[in-house]
Every structure is written in structure tokens, then in C-alpha cells.
Image (cartoon, rainbow, N blue to C red):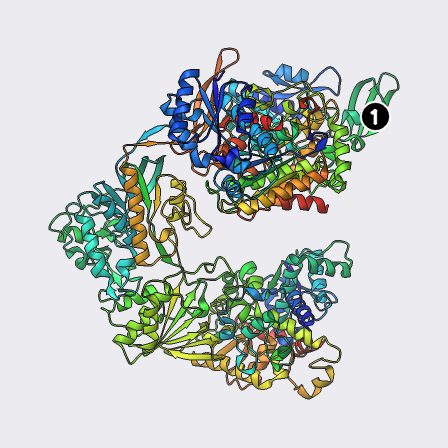
Amino acid sequence: MQVNGEYKPLIVAFCCNWCSYAGADLAGTNRSNYPDNVKIIKVPCSCRVNPMFILRAFQRGADGVILCGCHPGDCHYTSGNYYTRRRMALLFSMLNFLGIEKERTRVEWVSAAEGAKFAATMNEFTEAVAKLGENKRLEDLRCKR
Amino acid sequence: MQKITSEALINKACELLENKTVNRVLGWKVGEFAYDITPALFTDCDSLKSDFVFGDFCGANFSKYLVSETRKSDEKVLVFLKPCDTYSFNQLLTENRFNRENVYAIGIPCEGMADISKIKAAVGDGIVGLSSEGDKIIVDTLYDGKQEIDAKSVMAERCAVCKSKKCVAYDELMGEEGEIVDSNRFDEVEKLEKMTEDERYAFWQGELSRCIRCNACRDICPACTCENCVFDNPESSVQNKAISDSFEEKMFHIIRAFHVAGRCTDCGECSRVCPQNIPLHLLNRKFIKDINDFYGEYQAGAEVGNRAPLVDYTLEDLEPGEALERGAEN
Amino acid sequence: MKVSYFPGCTLKTKAKDLDAYARKCAEILGITLEEIENWQCCGGVFTTARDEIATKLSSVRALNDAKEKNQALVSVCSACHNVLKQTNYAMQTDEEFASRANNYMQLDEAYLGETQVLHYLELLRDVVGFDKVAEKVVNPLKGKKIAAYYGCLLLRPNSVMKMDDPENPTIIEDLIRALGAEAVIYPYRNECCGGYVALENPDSAKEKSLKVTNSAKNAEADIILTACPLCKYNLEKNGADIPVVYFTELMAEAFGIKEDCNA
Amino acid sequence: MQRIGVFVCWCGSNIAGTVDVQAVSEALKNEPGVVFSTNYQYMCSQAGQELIINSVKEHNLTGIVVCSCSPRMHEATFRKTAAAAGINPYMVEIANIREQCSWIHKDMEIGTEKAIILGKAAIAKVNLNAPLTPGESPVTKRALVIGGGIAGIQTALDIAEAGFPVDIVETKPTIGGKMAQIDKTFPTLDCAACILTPKMVDVAQNDKIRIFSYSEVEDVKGFVGNFDVKIKKKARYVKEDICTGCGVCTEKCPMKKVPNEFNLGMDNRRAIYIPFAQAVPKVATIDPNACNMLKSGKCGLCAKVCTAGAIDYTQKDEIIEEKYGAIVAATGFNPISMDKFDEYAYNQSKDVITSLEFERLTNAAGPTAGKLLRPSDGKHPHKIVFVQCVGSRCESCAEKGKEYCSKICCMYTAKHAMLTRDKYPDTEVYVFYIDVRTPGKAFDEFYRRAVEEYNVHYIKGMVGKISPEGDKLMVRGSDLLNNKQLTIDADLVVLAAAIEPDKSARPLATMLTASMDTNDFFTEAHPKLRPVESPTAGVFLSGACQGPKDIPETVSQASAAAAKVIGLLAKDKLTGNPCVAQANELMCNGCSSCEKVCPYGAITYVDKEFRMPNRTTAIRRVASVNPAVCQGCGACTVACPSGAMDLNGFLNKQIIAEVDAICK
Amino acid sequence: MRKEIENLQNEIIRISGVNPRKCMRCGKCSGTCPAYDEMEYHPHQFVSMVESGDIEPLLNSKSLYQCLTCFACVDRCPRGVEPAKLIEAVRLAAVRKQGQNHMTANDIPEKLDEDIPQQALVSALRKYSK
């Protein structure tokens, strides 16, 4: 994403309601700073995230997509994040197979207590994506204004 | 190349029609050109004798046709299944896509199908006739008359790396029981994995940008039997659109491959029917290879009722980050 | 039925009778023991060190030989059997070891533990069947109380040997019963006789061996039965006042062919 | 088209300090669907909520977006506000511009810009929101307790106490479970029967409780509040309502050599039997595998001696169907088999016994009438060795032992050791241990008493091998603290066998769609905060089926489970979460992918007739979600290849709209 | 020095394939060992001493040559630690050093008696020398 002629990566973060969204809230409560480029979408569980959503985000110009859920074993729905883990392992591997930089996609387990980890993860991920530059490979140019 | 003859199949079909085991037969018949074989439904012996063929261009996988065909009547339909078709057959049964009772399945051996584009590359255009004799294919062309070519050299890629000559589902088996083959079907995928991200991107850009979004790959795919495909569904936000540019077709193919991941039996029909000759099967094979590497060997359709890897998990599954790291090591 | 046969060094020297009875009895049971050509000594013990290749190659050669003939590999000596089975297991499960061994061997086709390794006792139980063995008995050993002595090599490590319950085995007792004798169960039947430590510390071996023989005698056994020349040596050398006999000899006796064996 | 109102909260200076709230409400005014936009100091205050209510009325709003703190904080508040204003509570979306914006950014420009984007995403979602109504389902006010041990008994009594009917299903002919076999209980050493049997009688006399003894759960259908259960009442060949439990038949029966399972096979019972004197129900049962009459039609003695006429050789298994609102699993535990541990000679010597067998040997109602005698020769043992952790904490081979600590063995071994020394001071007692684990009230003191007052010899180390020699058991083990190998010539060896869940638990879990861990213990909904609930709504856990437990723990968990059941049964109707999955039947392929990933078993399949081209019809298998069971995780929506499965409140198109709004 | 110990420790762990950290200190190996009385360091001590890096005393102990490799400890260990393999690795670390063979062919004649089976000689040489 270009902002005032300057490159600023756009990050979409899908966070599960029970752990990671609460972790993000805690990061806020602790006033732990992380880039404003990160925009969070709340889902009930990481397993609600359809690969379609991720591709859509890239299509519309996101530069990186990160999925956050409860740690394996701690899923509010007992097994949702285990499915997430399989789906995303395969999807990310496929995206990389198509030549998409592997740094653009990430899954991170963040608990409701890990506000600091949430902020650190977002800082780190944004930085890694920023290094790659703009996402051109997955972008649909028609969606550009 | 094929050892089993049309006559044998016709006789068997006639016998089953006559003794009322079945009332119709799914089979192949010649289309506009000798190599242009199309699926057809036969209901009597006479039409079978005049039109039914089986040979080196009968690649079509009939499993998918059973979904709609079995709904038409409660009487049995006869279907001939080559080894790779039987895997799709099982997978569709696993997904409850048709009623097994309504089908009489005959497993037939397959020695590998020919790829018409390879033949054309060898003999040029204007093919008017084709016949096979042992390991040779005799091609009659408009311009150069009859030419003889080695059948192996024009075998379809999917057959050259055939994963199984064993029919895993049938009511009756004709010919010999084959075996599961130790093939090197992942070689192409591995080659791509060894490239850099940039090289891979360039490769796929070259391939996928040719896509015309004709949907043939989806329409032929035995795993794509959805009542209503997401690409036809206006509510899905990915409804079919004319192809435009760099991403649309990629998104289509990724989503399609993901939707069939863990269910794809690697029958290779997608690549066979692609009018643009895009090696679409490589996407499916990548998923199959990853599934094998990450979660243990899995062959969709090997048995009815197997739990597909994407609706399963173990507590020790690898993390997506580790999956990407493994990719990077290649 | 034909199987590959690995006699081992001791069966060619000090334990010729163990070998001779085994061959003759196999004949009676319709099994042909085809001696592996150019076999080399297994080394007596399996080295558990994962980085040692050379000490295991003779076993790999024998195993591969049997593989090429598409036969199971049978041995009578407990030690040989233990070494062969452990080596085979390493070839199956330790990828690094297997690739190094294969690189060294330069075979046309890599050996990856395909051969089935059988102890002669397993051959009797699983291939022939003890009921068939019993059918061949002409001279039932009625009234004899016999104590099976397993020692350590036949049963352990259980994860590899998978021969019988390592703590409460029955395979030799079942053979004894098939031959018409009475099997005596005693606690030291799966304890070590002292093995090769006999050379290093004869007192230690003596103590171990005495525990075994005393245990068998307390159980009122007339005979101790073994499959291992070293066990036999240790028990006899260390004051066993009870006969220690190879199981093949007992079998030959029951089959009524003991005299024909030239042992 | 929605008519959306946007309400931007200042949260005092919490938001307004870093976000230009005026600019945000201005910017969002022009978004599609928005007809009104404003900002206010504290939107969650009474005045703020009134502002919303009035605006709804004034502008005929159909949807509300509140840009404020986290929805985890005030989503419920604003949903109530919406309801008060007369619109569906699920037409409200929150843009989190405090925790995820103003609190983490310092620059007003950046904060404002991000707040606007978050607002736009919320607006995009509300545009696609639809009113949702939570489903309601009635509650059958009856509970089922599976298992009649102390856990099941306590749970049933507590539920009945609250006035709800309860049924107990027990596979054995009597309730009582393992506790009935135990002699004394630690750490107080009161007699187990003295505290258990009154409870068993309470159960029998409670008119709210029915006991289905000698019965099994055959099938479970339905969901929380509405379970349909089939119970198989096995034929006991004795009419339960007529038998008086006089016991004459059990004395006259000529089949005397049937191993008595209550005494773990250490003595015999008859083919017709009452497991023990205080059995509940106190009714005889004929063992069909031992009874001559049932096997060959010859005998019939019991029928002749029964003055009540209760014997019925023609009795058949009976299936009882009943509806329940809640189900409690209380299937308990068993000691593992000692077959794979024959280094301890369990199969080679009668004098090597398990701790449960020891309980029977010391119990006054046991095979030796409470005298501690060796099973082999009936002599009094003078040297006893106890071996702890037999099969517990055993990782080397899964088919052998259990990786976990069985938790109760340290304490009962101390109890056995102490009682032995107390009753038979001439007996030497040794305990081989790896660690002595005694966390619990008065537990460590108890163990120390065994050592200090009763002079039980605790040896840190493990037994390697036990050799029966003559009438002695030579126990060879290590004494790690003295760096010695010991051989003890014991008369009796007692093995503290690991415990494992009862074998009936696994098939039951499948019927209940309740999840289990790899050891076949039931999993709890949350290991800390919901320890007595299964993740499957309406299924609760009581006792050792959830993990190894001693009696006090079992009883407290049993009461906790009862409290949860009572809480459920006290409701007339269950209100669900309306954000549940729903299947579009027209698009569903019936492929079962969704069913396979559903953690709750909320998805079933129905055959439906559909119109097909050319005026034909076809019957297709389609998914159907039970909204009362679905918890709304969404796993099914992604597993579904056709997109037939969607999640209310988080529809595919809603999430995509959010993505689009953020990525614009 | 520390580095050296670590190297030796890693070497022993690598050769044996044993993870001494799996040990839960139950002592069953030593409780079951038939050669216990001949040993100065017992099987459980081998495990804990290798784990703590206290390997030097083991290398110099005659305990190394008393182990019968009877695998009783391997089979009975509840944690799958396999002490006999560890002892073998320590012994190899000792005898593989130049000139450190514990028994050589020259030592054999005096130990020989008429009946001793070949098997005993090859085994002993394999165990005690490199």
C-alpha cells in the first residue's frame, strides 16, 4: 500500500474471539504499541477463517495476512485450531509453491494473557512484510483505485 | 496399447443388458475425430455394437457421471472403470455422492492412455485416422499418409507416472488384477520446489496467465461434484467472472485446488481437458505431496470411508511455519 | 520348505552336535536348511553403538543372501540369532546406519531389513507348528522333568526379538511338552548365565550360573535345556550337577534319531 | 438497504485523546447505509444509551455501529440498548477503536485514520447483518447418571435432593462400585462400607431415584435438554420386584465353583448370587454362563427353593427408552492387567497380588473373613513387600503401562502398610517407591505416621525382579539412597497397579459425542474453569472417568457435576447462541465433511426430496445443524467445499465485506 | 574443560541413541541388574552421571567390563532409557582410545580352557577391545 508516496504494508490479522482477540485487547490495555498498519478482524475461532478470506485480502491489496488463535490444546471449541493448523500449513505451502513469499503469511498462537506477545508478533510480522515490499503477485489490479 | 478389447467390453455390456442386471451403460464413443472420444450412454446392444469403443483415447473418468446418472433411475447403470477411475469412485462413495446400489461397476485394466497433443507434435496436424497395434500407434494423416509411432513416446504424462494399476472398487473385474505402482509422480513438483520463489512465480505466471476461465477443469473433475459450485454462487463473493488479469485466475485455481485437497485422487483429468495445456495437476499433486510429507501417506479413494486429512488432525501436527520452513529447505 | 541357515562359528567347532541334531530334525519335519555360502562369524554379540558398521556387516551379508534367495534366515545359536535380529532391526529402523551399511556393501539393490529372521524355535512354533512336532515323536520323553533355560539372548531386547513374553515365556516349555516331557517353570530361566564375562571375571559368571542351576534344581528338574553353547558351557563349567542339554538333542531323542546324527 | 446509525464514543479522553472523534463521525457519515452519525463522551453511560435509543427512533435506524472499546467489554451492553430501542440486538456491531487503536497509537492523525477504517469495516458488516433470534428448546427435567459407584451415587443423590428425578445405570448387579470393595479409607481409616452403604440405602429409598442395575446404555440421541436414551436391562432371570433378597437360592445352587468377581476371583460364588450382603438392589442374579438350567435346561433348583416365586428362566433383555435433560458420565476406573509385568511374577505366584486384591484380603466380608492370609497356602505372611508405580509413569511401551501417575497408589499403599503393621505387629513391611506423592489434606502426615509410628520400611528404588523360590518370593530391587541392591525374601508381594478408565467409557464417549484424551479419560470443557463439564453441552463428568481421583475428590467432583446438572434442569427453556452454523440444503452435497470436523456432533443428515430438471425429483442427503448443540466455532464452514455451510453472525459475505473495507 | 565434557557427553548420547534425561530415577535398572554386585557404578548411576557430565570416573571404572549386556535393564525400564546401551557407549569411549583395549588376543591363551566355545572368545574381544 502506498501512503503519501511512501510504502506502508497493509496487514490483515484474523483473531479468534477467545484467545487472540483478547490478547490484542490486553496489548491495548498495556499500551503496547504496534503498527497501525495492522487491522484486526474478529472471528469466533481461527477455524472460521476460510482460505478464501485470506486470498481476498491479498487480492484487495493486503501485503501480509496473519492468523491468530488459541494455543493448540487450548481452543475454546477444543479442536478448532487443530484444523486451522492443517489447513494453513497446506494453504501457505501452496501459496509459496506459486511463488508467494513465505514471509507474507503466518499463523501465530496467542493466548488471552499474551498481550506483549501479540504486540511483538505484530511488530515483527509487519517488519518482515515491509522488507518484501508491496504485494504485487497476488494483487488484483482492477481492485486498485 | 490397451490389452482389453472393445469387443470384450461390448459383449460383457450386452450380456448384462440382456440379463437385466443393468438397463444402461456408460461408455465411450467416437466423436468428431478418431481421437476425440466422448462419453456416451447406451441403452441397447445394437448401439453398443455400432458405437462403443475402447482404446488409447478413452481417458475419460466416468465416476463423476454417476452422481447425476444414478439419480435418474433406480435401475442399475453399468460403468467401466479404469484403475484410476476406481479411486474417484471410492472417494465419491465416501462422500455419499451416489447410491452404490444403483451401479454395476466393472473394473478394467489400463495400459496408459495416449496424449493427442504429443501425437500432433510428432506427426503434425490433419489426423484422419488412428489405430493401435501392439506398442505402435498408426496415425493416418491428411498430408503425410500413414505413420507409425511408438505408443510409449506419446503416452499421457499422468499415465507415464501412473500411481496404480489396481482397481480398488468393482463388482466384477475383467482382465488381470493390477498392482499399486511405485511411481515417480512427484518429480515435477519437486523440480518446482527446488526453484526460487521468483522462478516459481515466473513459471506459474506463465502457465496460469493462459487460463481462459473456461471451467473445463472444474467440470471434468470427479472431486468437483458440488450441487452448486462456489464459483457459480453469487453469495460466495468469488462468483465466476471473465478473466481479467494477474490474480483472478490464480485465485480460482488456488481455491479449486484447496477445495479438492485431501479428496483429489490424482486422476489427472483436469490437465487432460485443459484447452490451454496448463499443468493443473501439479497444483493437486503439490497438496498430495504435502499431505504425505506432513501427515503420513494418504491416497484419496483407496478405501471407502477413509477420513480425509483435512477433516482430521493429530495433536502433534506440524505448524504452518514449519511447513513453510520445510519448503524453504528444498 | 527351504530356509537359509546360519550355523555360526561355535556350531562348526565346539557345538557340532547342536548343529547336527538341528539338521536331522529339520529333515524329519520337512524343512531343508540351506547353509548360507561363505557366511562369516556374527561376532558373538551385537554392538549397540549406532556408529559401528564394520562389526555388523557379516550379519548384513547373511541377511542379504537370504533376501536374494527369498528365504527366511534361521539360526540355532541364541547369540547368532540375537545378533542377526538386532542387526536386521537396525537396518529397518536406523536410516543413517542402513545407508552407511548399504554404501559400504555396494549391493545392486539396497538391503533394508526385508529378510525374516527366525530362531529355530520360532521355526518350530510358527512355521512347522508344535502339533506337527508332536506327531513326529516316536520316543516320548515321559516322566522327564525338564527346565527350559532361555538366558538373556533369546528374549531380549523384547522390542526387537519379539519372540515371546520376555518375563513369562512359553516357547521352549511348549516344545518340551510336545516332546512328551514335563516342563518345569523356575524363576531364573530368563536370567543371564554370565555370558562372555566368563573370560573377564570367571567368579562373576560362576555366581550367575550357579543361581540358574540351583533355581532349576529347586524346582526339581532333571535336565536343563538350552539353545546356547555359551550358556551350556557356563552352566556346566560352574558346577552344574544336572545335565545341560541342547534342545535339538532332546528333540532328536524324542524323534528316535539321536544315533543317526553322528554327533 | 439498512439505515445505520454510527455512534462514536470518546471514552472520556481514552479514545478522544488520540482519535479525533469528530472527524471519525464526520467521515463515517458518508458510508453506504449510514443515515446518522454522531459522537458522545461516554456512550455506555445512561445518557449515551438514551442517545442511541432516541436516534434509533428519530432516524428509523435498522442497524447500529458503535465505535468504542472492545466488544468484549460492552457488546452485551449495546445489544441490550438496541433491544430497548426496538431493534434486534444482533444488528449491532462494535468497532474497537480503544484497545486496538487509541491505546496503542500516539499520533492523532494515525489514530483517527485507523479508527475510520475500523468503523468502515463495522459498517460494511452491519450492512449485511440480519436479525438473529436465539433458538429455544425445552428441557426434560430428568437426569441420567451412568455408573453407580460413589461418584454416580453422590451425583444422583444431590440431583434428587434438588427435586429432580434421576436414573442410575449400572452394569453390575449392584451399585457401590470400587468403593464397595475397599476395606478402609485414607487418611481417616474409617471403614468404607460404613460410609458407603448408608448412601446406597439412601439411593434405594429415594423416590426420585431409579436404579437400572445390570443394565447398559445402548444408544444416545438428541442434545442438551433433550436426550433420547435407550437402556438395555440385561436379563437377570430373577424378577426384581418380587425377589426379597433372602439368599436361600444362593445357598442351595449346586454350581459352587464360579469365580467370585467381587472378591476378584479369590473365592467362589454360586451361579445364582447376590454380590455382597449390602447390595442395592438386594436381588439375586443368575449368571447365564454358569447356570445349568439356562445352559442345558437341567436343574431348576433355585426356582424350587424360592418361596416368593421370583425366578424366571425365560426372562429376556429389555430395552427401556427414556428422555433426559442431562447426562452424567461416572464410569470409573479399573486396575490395569498385570499380564505384561511378569518380572513381578503376578502370573507365576498366587502370593503376588494387586492392591485391590489386598483390600479384599483384609476385608471382613472378603474371602478370608478379614484375616490377612496368603492366597497360596493360607498362612499368615510375616514379610510383605509393596511395590508402587506398577504400570504408572511408564512410558516405554504403551501396551504395557500408562504414562500418567495414578495418583491414589501412594496413599492407599501407606494405608495398607500401616494397617498391616497395626493389626500384625510381627509382620515386616517394605514399600518400594519412586516418589511418595501425598498432596492432600492430612495426607503427608498420614504417610509419615506409617514411617515414624508404624515403622514401615520405605525404600527409594524399584523392584527389578521377583522370583518365587519355595514358599518365598525373592524380591530383588534397588535401594538408591544406600546405593545397594537388595533381595528381600517376602511372603507376600502387593503391586500398586496403575488405574485406567473403565473399558465401557470409550464406546459411551462415542455415543455421547464427548471427547476423550489418548488415555481414554473424558476431556473436560476447560481444564481449569469447567472441570466437570464435557465439551458436549448437557454431558457432565463425575469421578475417575475424567482422571485418577481419590474418594474425597471424587465426591466433591460428583457434587459439582450435580450442581451443574441442577442448574441446567432448573431452566424451563434453553436459550441458545444464535450465532450458529446453518446449512443451505440446496447447495449441500451431503459429503459429511462438516460432520467430521464438528466438535459437538451438532450436524446430522436427512434425506430430502429435491426438484430436478425435467420435472423429476431426487432424494438427496443433506446436512442439518441442531442449533441447540452448535456452539458456533465455524469449523464446518471451511470444511464444506460447496459453501453450503455458513455461520450466522459471521457469514462468509460479512467477513469478506470487512476484508474489503479494510483493504480499500 | 567444560567443552570437553560436553563433547564427550554428546558423543556418548549420539553413539548410544539414549536420552538420559528421560530417566525418572526409579532405579529399576539397578534393581534388576545381575552384575550389580560386581559393579562399582551401577546402571542408574551410569545414566545420571552421563547426564550430569560426570563421565571421567566411569571411563576409569572396571564396572564397564562387568556389564553382561543381558538387556534386563533395557526391557524393564519404565521410561525406555536403555541403560545397557549407554554403558556400551561409555565402554567404547574408553576402549576406542589408542592403546586402551581392555583385552587383546594376547590375553586369550591364559584364559582358555578346552571347552570354551568360540562364541565366548569373539564376544569378549568385541566387547573389550577395538
Q: Name, please, the residue furthest toward the top.
A: D614
Q: Visible in this render: residue E72?
A: yes
Residue D372 horizontal/vertical position (percent): 27, 72
Q: Is residue D403 above or below residue D564?
A: below
Would residue E27 be found to the left or right of residue D249 on screen? right
Location of residue E59 by image quarter: bottom right
Horizontal side, residue D431 vs residue C91: left or right: left
Say which of B47 and C110 sits in front: C110
Q: Quadrant of residue C245?
A: bottom right
Determine if residue D147 is in view: no
Quarter placement of the C terminus of chain C: bottom right
Residue type beneath disc 1: Ala
Of all residues shown, which one is farthest toward the right? B144
Residue position for label 1: B121
Q: Quadrant of the N terminus of chain C?
A: bottom right
- Residue D421 relative to residue B280: left or right: left
Mark 1, other Cα within 10 Å: few <14 / some 14–19 / many ≥20: few
Disc 1 is placed on an element classified as helix
Q: Number of numbered discs present?
A: 1
Residue displayed at 71% across by 56% down:
C111
Residue D532 placement (x, y as % from top left): 36, 47
- The chain holding disc 1 is B
Q: Quadrant of residue D486?
A: bottom left
Residue at the farthest left position: D307
Relative to C56, is D146 above or below? Answer: above
Q: Nearer the viewer, residue C82 or D107?
A: D107
In the rendering, at what x and y percent does residue B319 appear?
Answer: 60, 45
* Residue C98 image offset from top left, x and y in percent: 70, 59
